[in-house]
Structure formats: structure tokens, C-alpha cells
Image (cartoon, coloured by chain):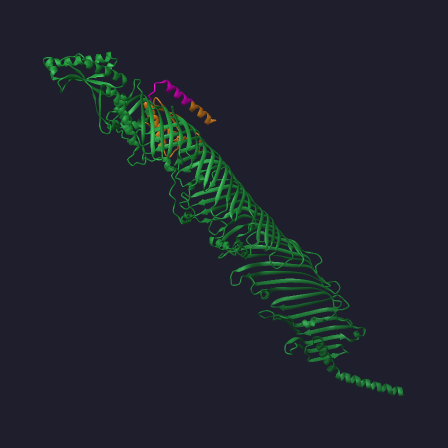
């Protein structure tokens, strides 16, 4: 029960973020750079599996989506995204599904 | 008177006769006794003296000696026999002896290889004729001695019973109340005999004989010299009760107790068998009219057995034995009953019961074993195998008894907690192995209806040299020797098992010949094998299912031949994990996922094993990882129409990849991570390598893999380049399409593909065309289109290559590329919309290669709508060492750029290029004025009109206008004071002219007047970069100081 709720909440947050981002004045140049760098940094984390997480940046707000195997990986993804220059906020909609459930 | 004389004469004669008889009586009796004894024994007889007084009834015999026939050895005799009898009793044919005393009787019995020395006395002696009743009121025997010389032994031995004392009363042929007691010391042991209810004829007696503490050690003399066990010591106490009756025969009851018996193996010090106590009881033994009956014979005792393992000092305490034999008759009237119950050395119980018949009739016996510990018996197994377990059996033997192992046995044999393995190695273990329906016809065949192996556990290992070690198998040397022997020489019986059942088995495969070492655990193995036999009777039918390593189920149902090796059947798997087998792919990657398949497989015999498989295969959650990262994943893959013909070809009719995803990463070391993961490691050299190399020659053709139809559904690629700064990352999603005719066969026709997707989230990507076989010469014919790709996503490369960034803009391009072997012919149509660039720090490669800053180039290339449309053809021979794709693209771009921007520039000026088409500089035709005039001349108006058209054509370009004042102008305006005003008027004239001609006057930038080197004045026109939007401060803030790819 907890996972569907978490997934629903994450999806709602992501949708809200995308909608707000779409309504707002965006800077593709800036957000494209943030998206690229967040993805690249997630990929560069070799001791955890964050390569497939979805990354969207709207007005310097990064939305993370997808699944990881542990809460620690989820927190790591958050920290990695927040560490990218220019990122003002991270909305973490990543779902924890446990090993082998991805 | 005559009568009286006659009487006197007769009396005288009688007197004389009596006198003569009296005188001759001793000698007569002496001779009569000797003659009679000689007649009975046929041996020399001597008697010292005989005194017989018939009147007083007294007989004395002294010094009787009966010698052997050789006349030297004494056979029997006594010192003195004195008898007192009633002579008158003879009148009624009844000899009444009041007293008989025998002193120092001696008897010597000799056992020879051909028989006893008394054999001639016992043979042929018929029943004595009864012509006289005898009654002995009192009989005394003193100082008797009996010896038995056993010369049949290899080591002759004499047994002595001495001190024989007998006292009997009322011995008679007319009464049965006689009694007697006898005592002796036999081989040092006191022996007593008590007789009751005796009658001399017809014989009847009841006897009780007891012997105490008899030394049993001499009994070893009667054991075979090569016996495995030798009686070392032991003592026995026994009681024998016998009833002998002339009519009823003999009946007996005996008990015996053996204590402290010890048996040794020849040459060993430690006792092999110790019997603290053993009791025997013989009851209801009857012998009558040559018929023997044994009512019951029971044996009970305990023994400890030495642990037979080499070097072991332990003993197995204490094995008990209870055995009974009942209802035995001879000649056989009915079967006897045998019942043996024993504990087994080392642990366990043995029961042997049934009906016994003497050979050649068959006996029916049932042998039951329970919890017999096999460990003590393991050394009896040939080879260096370690065997342990607890055996149980329920066997029926139906055959004549023989001094050998039974040859016809049926029943059940089982071993619990079995362990079999070479000493020091892991064992093959099983909770239970049970053979049902066992039929042994030794030594010809052993047949089993069903063998059930419950929870077998074992590990098969392959070491680094490639040698395989199977638990339970004999050591390699022994196995090879056995294999080399013809089957007929082994002497082993034929083995056959109708059915072998394996339940809940677990088998581990540990392979150290690969790196990293592989451990595969096959669990929950259930199997049914029919037709098992040795020698092989034909193919085996094998049905097996198991839980393979990592979970899931796998099963096989088919036929297996071992000589030669062949296989045919159906193999299925559900959810079988892929990961455990990855080490055999020699890839550094971690590969996960699960596989389902349903395949008809066959392996044909031959010098080169050939395996075929047909069916369907599906996989789910396939992923390829380095350490922890997923680099490749396929949510589900389905292959139908799979046909593998190993090692030649593998074809798939339809392969569908659902949601495949791939990470294409170039790391900071300029390495493609995925390629590194999927590049096989070099094979490890080992002792097994030479043989492998022989079996897999380097020139063996590679396996051809062909996929007729490959469908990709909803695929994705994340491309990441860590070498540039900031790093580049781009997601391509929704990849969908088909590839038809994929093959590694160099002779195969090109594959056709048609793919589409979204790059960067919004740009539509489509590609279609044909590509030649992977292993063949490069053949490619691709048409690809990309629509509305956001150019700011390429900023990492723009920064690195040209030190510019795109703030906005989209790219739409179509590429047509043909490669035939080494001939490249490509054309790219590019449409760039709303491109807006900003300058960053660093080297502008565009300026270095084209001659103009990128911003200027872009501005010049834009059309009225701000779009850039170029066609970039690239061609060449890939095999040409001078050909460089990057340089070719740059060269083409330069040519296109120069060509594109030359056209508008040619309206207003001239482009000077170097030999390699690089723009050296651009000369814009100035707007000339007459000296001192600010009025446009007709030529000046035309130039102004061209400038206006130019500005309209290239909306992002700006022009600088520089008043060039000449010496003529100075002269015309009377000095330098008027020159600035002249310059401003001329600038205004040009600006107004351009504006009037439709040009954008705001894109004109006036520069400070300058002195013209020539005599004529003019407004010099030059190209300006687009609106300067450099934001180096922001760039530095975001990415650091450098833009050369490093932070």
C-alpha cells in the first residue's frame, strides 16, 4: 500500500512541477545544462544504480523519478542532484522498490 | 554192592575231576579271560593274575593290559578289578554283583587322519545278545585315566582326563533306579557326571554332566590355519543333561557359558573380537532310530569388535547376539526355524529368521538390518573411498544353504544419511538411498525394480587445471584403469535398475577453471531415470526438474545415450536466472535477468558434438551492470522460432525487445563503458588450455547468428559524455522499430531497419535503411531524420569545439549516408531555426577553421526568417589514410559556410580566401563620396541599396560604418576643423540611404572617423559580430574557468 501511494504522490508532484514549469518562463539553455549534468553525475555514481532515473529541470527545479533499490540510493540521488551548480530545489519522486524489483 | 562200588568210583572220579579242576582253575580262568578279551579286541592282551572263586563269588583280575596291535602301545587296562557276586544267582540267569571295584583304569584313544584307534571295535558290532541279567549293587572306579591323542592335527595334541572317580549303585538290567556319580579333572578343569534312573538293559539313564572353567584356547587347533580370526583364549562352563533310553532314544538338554573369549587376527596384538560372556542352550535334542531332532538351540552373548580402520584404536562396544535354531530334524521331516537377532559392530541391528532346509533343498530366510553403521565397513570398499551411512535391509533368501554369500536374494536395501567420497574430499551425500524390488542372482546379475535417492547432496568440482572431481567416483587412476579393462574381465555382475527416482536433490557445480570461479547450486532436483544398467542396455529415459541457480524452474524430458554420448528431448525453463552463468561468457559485466524457454534439444553422437535446439525463448529483466550500475537492460525479450545448430548456426525467426534501454557512456578516460563490459576477457592460461586449444582450433568457423525479424518496442538510450564540460547527457526515448535480416553471416544480404524515437524528450528521430552483415564488409545505406532538436543540449560540444553556446535554436536534419566497403557518400540537409549563440571563453575553432567567428558565420548564414539551411555532402574513401571523418566534416562545413556567406557578401564586397578555402578577410565595398561632399553619388546609392538588401537578407548581422576622411576632404572643407562634421553628414547620408532602401538602420554602428590612406573620402563598411551577448562571468560561475573540457 505504501509503494502505490508513494508512486502516486511522486507522479503528482512531477506532473505539478512539469505543469508549473510549462506555465512559467523557462530557460532551455540553463535547464538543459542542469539536466545533462544531473544525469551525468547520477551515472558517475558507480557504487549505486542511479543510471536510469528520470531527470527533468524546469526553472532550476530538478524533478527526479524512477525506481531504486533502497532508501539510501534515493537519498544519494537527491544529494547528487542538489549538488549540481544552479539547482535551486530537488523534488524527489523516486520510488524505493527493493532489490530485484526494478 | 555193585551199586555202592560204582558210586564210590564215580565219587572218586568226580573228586579227582574236582581236584583237577581246582588245581587247573586259576590257569583256566586266566587263559579264558585273555582269550575272551583278545577275541573281543583283536589285540594282544595280558593279565597278571585272575582269581575266581565261584563258591564265594569272588573275582579278582589284576594287571590287565590290552595293547595296540603293534604290541607296544597300551590301549586300555587297569591295575585291579575285584568283583563280589552271588554265584547262586547265576542259576536264575541273574548275575548279582554286590561289589565291583576297578582301580586305576586307563584308556588311550588315538585320533588318526584315517580314523580312531577304536574304529574297528565300534564298527560292525551288533547289539549284544541278552542271555543274562546283571545287577551291580555297588561299583567303584578309582584313579581312572583317559587320554585322547589327536594325531590328525598338524600339531599333534594329547587331551587328558585324569583322576577319574566313579561310584555307582544299583546298576541292573532289571531295574531302572541305578545311580552313579563320576568326577575327573579334564585338561585342568573339573568335570562331574551324575547319572540317575539307570538301567543297564534295555539301557536307560539320566545323566547330568558339568564341566567348569574349561580352557577353550586349544580349540584353535581345530580352526583352519588360514582363518581370519584365531581363538586366543576363553573358558567355558557347561552342563549337559542327557536321557538315554533304549526305546525312546536319546534326549539331551545342554547349557554352556563361555567367558572371556578373545579372538585375534593373525599377526595383530589387539583383539579383533572380545566376548565377555556367551551363553548357549540346547533344548529338546532327541535322537531315536537314526532320527535327530533339535527342539531349540539358543545362543546369546555380547562382543566388542575392534574398529577395523587402519590405525584406529577404538572398539565397538558391545554387540549383542541372540540366535535360536528350532525344529531341526535329520533326516529332514520339516524345515527348521532360525531366528538370529544381533547388534552389529559399530551400531545397528541384524535379524535373520526363516525356515531352514538342508541342501540341496532351498531354505527360506529373511534378513533384516536396521541402522547398521557403514563406517566400520568402509574399508572393505575398494579404492580410497570414504563411505558412511546407516544401512537397513529387508531381504529374502530362497536357496540351498552354502558356505558362501547367498546368490538368490530379493527385497529392499536402503542406506540412510549416506556419504560417499574420496577421502579428504567433499562427499556425495543423501538422506536415503533405497533399492526396492532387489533381485540378486550372484554373480550373474543384480536387478532392482526401483532405486529411490532422497535428498542427495553433492558437489562436482573442476579445478584450475580443468580436472573434474566427482564425489563418489573412484580416483582418476583407478577409474582409468577400470575403463581400460574389457567389461568381461571385471567379473562384476550385470546391473539393472528399472527406475531410479531422485527426490529433492541438490547438486553444486564449482568451477575454478574460469575467472571468477563459478558456483552453481541446482536445488530441488527431482528426477526419474529408467533403463539404468551396466553394461548399458540402451538409452536412458530421463525426466528431471530442478530449481536452477538463482531460482525458477528447469526441466528436461528425453532420452540420453552414454555410449556414444547422445541426447534428445525437451528442455524447459521458467524464470531461470542468467547471472550465475555469466562467468562462462568471460565478460567483466554482471548480467542479470531471467529466462523462459521451451526447446526440443538433441545432441548427436560424432567426433564433433553437434547440438540442436528448436523452440521459443523469452527473457525478462535482463540487465548488464558494472559494479552496481545498470548499463543495459531489456524488460522483456521474446524469441520465437529459435533454431540452434551448434556450433554452426543459430537463427531466430522473431525477436522482440520490449523496453530495451542502454547507457552509452564515454567516461573521462575516453572509454565506452558498455563496450568495455561486453569485451570478453582474454582466456586464462591453465593446464587445461592445451587440450582446449586442440579441441577448439583457432580457424574453426564462428557460429553464425541470424535474426530474421527484430522488433524493438519503446526503447531508450541515455548517452552521457563525461569527457566534455559540462558533461553531455541526452535521453532518447520511445525507440520503436524493426530490423529484418540481422546476421553475422558475411554472405547474408543486408538487414533492413526502420527505427523511430524521441531524442532529448521532444525531437523526433527516425532512421531507416539497410546495413550489411556485422561480420562482412561495411555496407550501409541509411536515411535518418531529426526534427526540432533543441540545440542548447549540444552546448557541451559547442563550448569545447567553438567556445560558443546556443541559448536557443532547434535543429532539423536529414541524413542520407551510403557506405559501400570503404566508399563514403553522405549528404546532410540541415535546418537550424532560431539559433541564438553566445560567446564563451576559449578558442573559436570556427574562426580558426573558417576564418570568421562562429557568430558571424551563423549570422551570415541565416536567411530572412532567421533559419539556416545548408546541405553538407561528405564523401571519400574510408581506407585512404589521409581521410579523416572529422576533418572531412569540418572541411565540408567550411566550404558550405564560405559558399553560403559568399553569396550575400558578394553583393556588398568581396571575400578573400586562402588556398584551403578558409576566409582570409572580407572586404566590403565602401560608399565613396566626392571630396568634401556628403551627398551620395549614383554609385554610392547603389552600394547603399546593396547594403540595405544585405541587411535584410542577413537579419542578425550588423555593420560598422567608419568615415574615412582624405586629404581631398581636408582641402575641400578648408582644414581639419570641418572634417568631423563631414564625416557625420556622410554617415547620416548612408544610414538614411539604407533606411530608405528598407534596411535596418539600427544595425548600423558608427565608428570614429579615420584618415583615409587614399585621396577619396568614403564610408568604410565592415561586418560586425552579432549583438554581443558574451556572458563570461556567468560561464565562469557555472562551469569554472576553463572551457577546454576540463573543470
Please report the residue visible at 67 percent of the width from the left and 62 percent of the height from the top: B240
Q: What span is colored magenta in the figure?
A: A12-28
Q: Quadrant of the N terminus of chain B?
A: bottom right
Query: Which x, y percent locates residue B609?
Result: 48, 45
Q: Note whether B720 is above or below B536 in the view shown.
A: above
Q: Note whether B335 is above or below B810 in the view shown.
A: below
Query: Which x, y percent locates residue B151?
Result: 60, 71
Q: Is residue A17 magenta?
A: yes
Nearest the eye: B707 or B578 = B707
Which chain can be seen in orange?
Answer: A
Nearest the eye: B975 or B500 = B975
Q: Note whether B831 is above or below B228 in the view shown.
A: above
Nearest the eye: B375 or B173 = B375
Which chain can be seen in green?
Answer: B
Q: Main secondary structure of the magenta part?
A: helix
Q: Quadrant of the C terminus of chain B?
A: top left
Q: Is residue B1029 left or right of residue B595?
A: left
Q: Quadrant of residue B167?
A: bottom right
Amino acid at each position: 500500500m505504501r509503494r502505490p501511494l508513494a508512486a502516486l504522490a511522486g507522479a503528482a508532484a512531477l506532473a505539478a512541477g512539469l505543469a508549473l514549469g510549462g506555465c512559467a518562463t523557462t530557460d532551455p539553455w540553463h535547464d538543459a545544462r542542469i539536466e545533462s549534468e544531473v544525469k551525468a553525475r547520477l551515472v558517475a555514481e558507480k557504487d549505486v544504480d542511479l543510471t536510469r532515473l528520470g531527470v527533468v529541470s524546469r526553472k532550476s527545479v530538478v524533478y527526479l523519478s524512477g525506481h531504486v533499490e533502497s532508501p539510501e540510493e534515493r537519498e544519494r540521488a537527491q544529494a547528487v542532484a542538489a549538488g549540481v551548480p544552479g539547482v535551486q530545489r530537488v523534488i524527489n519522486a523516486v520510488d524505493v522498490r527493493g532489490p530485484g524489483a526494478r | 554192592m555193585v551199586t555202592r562200588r560204582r558210586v564210590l568210583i564215580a565219587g572218586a572220579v568226580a573228586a579227582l575231576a574236582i581236584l583237577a579242576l581246582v588245581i587247573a582253575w586259576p590257569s583256566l580262568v586266566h587263559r579264558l579271560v585273555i582269550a575272551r578279551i583278545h577275541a573281543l579286541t583283536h589285540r594282544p592282551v595280558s593279565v597278571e593274575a585272575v582269581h575266581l572263586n565261584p563258591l564265594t563269588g569272588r573275582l579278582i583280575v589284576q594287571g590287565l593290559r590290552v595293547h595296540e596291535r603293534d604290541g607296544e602301545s597300551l590301549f586300555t587296562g587297569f591295575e585291579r578289578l575285584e568283583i563280589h557276586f552271588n554265584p547262586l544267582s547265576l542259576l536264575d540267569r541273574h548275575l548279582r554283583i554286590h561289589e565291583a571295584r576297578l582301580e586305576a583304569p586307563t584308556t588311550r584313544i588315538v585320533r588318526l587322519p584315517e580314523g580312531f584307534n577304536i574304529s574297528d571295535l565300534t564298527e560292525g558290532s551288533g547289539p549284544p545278545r541278552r542271555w543274562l541279567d546283571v545287577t551291580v549293587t555297588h561299583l567303584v572306579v578309582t584313579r581312572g585315566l583317559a587320554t585322547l591323542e589327536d594325531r590328525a592335527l598338524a600339531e599333534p595334541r594329547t587331551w587328558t582326563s585324569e583322576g577319574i572317580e566313579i561310584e555307582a549303585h544299583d546298576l541292573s538290567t532289571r531295574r531302572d533306579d541305578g545311580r552313579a556319580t563320576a568326577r575327573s579333572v579334564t585338561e585342568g578343569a573339573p568335570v562331574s557326571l551324575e547319572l540317575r534312573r539307570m538301567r543297564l538293559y534295555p539301557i536307560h539313564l539320566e545323566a547330568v554332566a558339568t564341566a567348569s572353567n574349561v580352557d577353550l584356547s586349544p580349540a584353535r587347533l581345530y580352526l583352519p590355519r588360514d582363518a581370519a580370526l584365531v581363538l586366543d583364549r576363553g573358558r567355558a562352563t557347561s552342563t549337559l543333561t542327557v536321557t538315554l533310553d533304549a526305546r525312546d532314544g536319546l534326549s539331551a538338554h545342554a547349557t554352556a557359558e563361555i567367558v572371556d573369549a578373545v579372538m585375534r587376527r593373525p599377526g595383530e596384538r589387539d583383539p579383533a573380537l572380545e566376548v565377555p560372556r556367551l551363553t548357549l542352550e540346547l533344548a529338546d535334542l532327541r535322537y531315536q532310530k537314526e532320527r535327530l531332532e533339535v527342539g531349540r538351540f539358543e545362543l546369546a552373548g555380547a562382543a566388542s569388535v575392534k574398529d577395523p580402520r587402519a590405525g584406529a584404536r577404538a572398539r565397538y562396544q558391545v554387540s549383542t547376539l541372540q540366535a535360536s535354531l528350532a525344529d531341526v530334524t535329520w533326516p529332514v521331516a520339516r524345515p527348521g526355524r532360525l531366528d538370529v537377532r544381533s547388534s552389529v559392530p559399530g551400531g545397528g541391528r541384524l535379524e535373520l529368521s526363516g525356515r531352514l532346509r538342508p541342501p540341496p533343498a532351498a531354505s527360506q530366510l529373511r534378513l533384516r538390518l536396521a541402522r547398521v553403521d557403514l563406517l566400520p565397513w568402509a574399508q572393505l570398499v575398494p579404492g580410497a573411498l570414504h563411505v558412511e551411512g546407516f544401512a537397513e535391509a529387508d531381504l529374502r533368501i530362497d536357496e540351498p544353504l552354502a558356505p558362501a554369500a547367498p546368490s538368490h536374494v530379493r527385497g529392499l536395501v536402503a542406506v540412510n544419511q549416506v556419504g560417499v567420497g574420496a577421502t579428504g574430499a567433499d562427499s556425495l551425500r543423501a538422506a536415503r538411498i533405497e533399492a526396492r524390488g532387489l533381485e540378486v542372482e550372484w554373480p550373474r546379475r543384480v536387478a532392482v525394480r526401483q532405486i529411490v535417492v532422497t535428498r542427495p547432496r553433492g558437489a562436482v568440482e573442476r579445478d584450475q587445471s580443468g580436472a573434474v572431481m566427482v564425489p563418489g567416483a573412484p580416483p582418476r587412476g583407478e577409474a582409468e584403469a577400470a575403463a581400460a579393462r574389457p567389461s568381461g574381465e571385471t567379473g562384476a555382475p550385470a546391473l539393472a535398475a528399472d527406475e531410479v527416482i531422485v527426490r529433492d536433490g541438490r547438486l553444486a557445480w564449482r568451477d575454478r577453471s574460469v575467472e571468477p570461479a563459478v558456483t552453481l547450486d541446482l536445488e530441488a532436483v527431482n528426477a526419474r531415470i529408467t533403463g539404468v544398467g551396466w553394461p548399458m542396455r540402451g538409452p536412458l529415459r530421463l525426466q528431471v526438474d530442478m530449481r536452477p541457480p538463482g531460482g525458477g524452474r528447469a526441466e528436461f524430458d528425453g532420452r540420453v545415450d552414454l555410449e556414444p554420448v547422445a541426447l534428445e528431448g525437451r528442455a524447459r525453463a521458467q524464470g531461470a536466472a542468467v547471472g550465475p552463468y555469466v562467468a562462462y561468457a568471460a565478460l567483466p559485466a554482471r548480467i542479470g535477468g531471467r529466462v523462459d524457454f521451451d526447446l526440443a534439444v538433441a545432441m548427436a553422437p560424432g567426433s564433433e558434438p553437434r547440438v540442436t535446439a528448436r523452440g521459443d525463448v523469452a527473457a525478462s529483466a535482463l540487465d548488464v551492470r558494472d559494479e552496481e550500475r545498470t548499463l543495459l537492460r531489456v524488460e522483456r525479450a521474446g524469441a520465437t522460432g529459435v533454431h540452434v545448430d551448434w556450433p554452426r548456426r543459430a537463427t531466430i525467426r522473431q525477436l522482440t525487445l520490449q523496453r530495451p534501454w542502454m547507457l552509452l557512456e564515454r567516461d573521462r578516460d575516453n572509454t565506452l563503458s558498455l563496450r568495455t563490459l561486453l569485451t570478453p576477457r582474454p582466456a586464462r592460461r591453465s593446464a587445461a588450455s592445451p587440450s582446449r586449444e586442440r579441441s577448439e582450433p583457432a580457424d574453426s568457423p564462428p557460429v553464425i547468428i541470424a535474426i530474421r525479424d527484430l522488433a524493438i518496442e519503446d526503447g531508450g538510450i541515455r548517452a552521457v559524455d563525461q569527457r566534455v564540460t559540462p558533461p553531455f547527457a541526452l535521453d532518447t526515448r520511445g525507440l520503436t522499430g524493426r530490423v529484418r535480416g540481422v546476421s553475422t553471416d558475411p554472405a547474408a544480404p543486408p538487414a533492413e531497419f526502420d527505427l523511430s524515437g524521441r531524442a532529448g524528450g521532444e525531437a523526433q528521430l527516425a532512421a531507416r535503411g539497410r546495413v550489411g552483415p556485422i561480420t562482412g564488409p561495411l555496407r550501409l545505406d541509411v536515411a535518418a531524420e531529426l526534427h526540432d532538436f533543441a540545440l542548447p543540449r549540444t552546448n557541451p560540444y559547442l563550448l569545447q569545439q567553438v567556445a560558443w553556446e546556443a541559448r536557443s535554436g532547434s535543429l532539423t536534419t536529414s541524413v542520407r549516408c551510403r557506405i559501400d566497403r570503404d566508399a563514403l557518400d553522405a549528404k546532410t540537409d540541415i535546418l537550424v531555426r532560431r539559433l541564438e549563440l553566445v560567446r564563451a571563453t576559449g578558442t573559436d575553432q570556427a574562426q580558426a577553421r573558417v576564418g570568421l567567428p562562429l557568430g558571424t558565420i551563423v549570422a551570415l548564414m541565416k536567411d530572412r526568417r532567421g533559419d539556416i539551411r545548408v546541405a553538407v555532402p561528405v564523401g571519400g574513401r574510408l581506407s585512404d589514410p589521409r581521410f579523416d571523418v572529422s576533418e572531412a566534416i569540418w572541411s565540408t562545413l567550411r566550404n558550405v559556410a564560405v559558399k553560403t556567406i559568399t553569396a550575400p557578401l558578394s553583393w556588398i564586397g568581396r571575400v578573400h580566401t586562402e588556398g584551403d578555402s578558409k576566409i582570409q578577410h572580407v572586404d566590403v565595398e565602401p560608399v565613396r563620396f566626392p571630396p568634401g561632399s556628403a551627398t551620395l553619388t549614383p554609385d554610392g546609392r547603389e552600394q547603399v541599396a546593396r547594403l540595405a538588401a544585405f541587411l535584410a537578407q542577413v537579419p542578425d548581422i550588423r555593420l560598422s560604418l567608419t568615415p574615412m576622411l582624405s586629404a581631398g576632404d581636408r582641402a575641400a572643407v578648408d582644414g581639419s576643423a570641418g572634417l568631423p562634421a563631414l564625416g557625420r553628414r556622410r554617415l547620416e547620408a548612408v544610414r538614411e540611404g539604407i533606411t530608405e532602401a528598407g534596411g535596418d538602420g539600427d544595425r548600423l554602428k558608427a565608428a570614429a572617423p579615420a584618415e583615409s590612406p587614399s585621396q577619396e573620402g568614403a564610408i568604410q563598411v565592415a561586418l560586425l559580430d552579432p549583438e554581443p551577448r558574451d556572458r563570461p562571468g556567468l560561464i565562469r560561475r557555472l562551469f569554472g574557468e576553463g572551457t577546454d573540457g576540463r573543470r
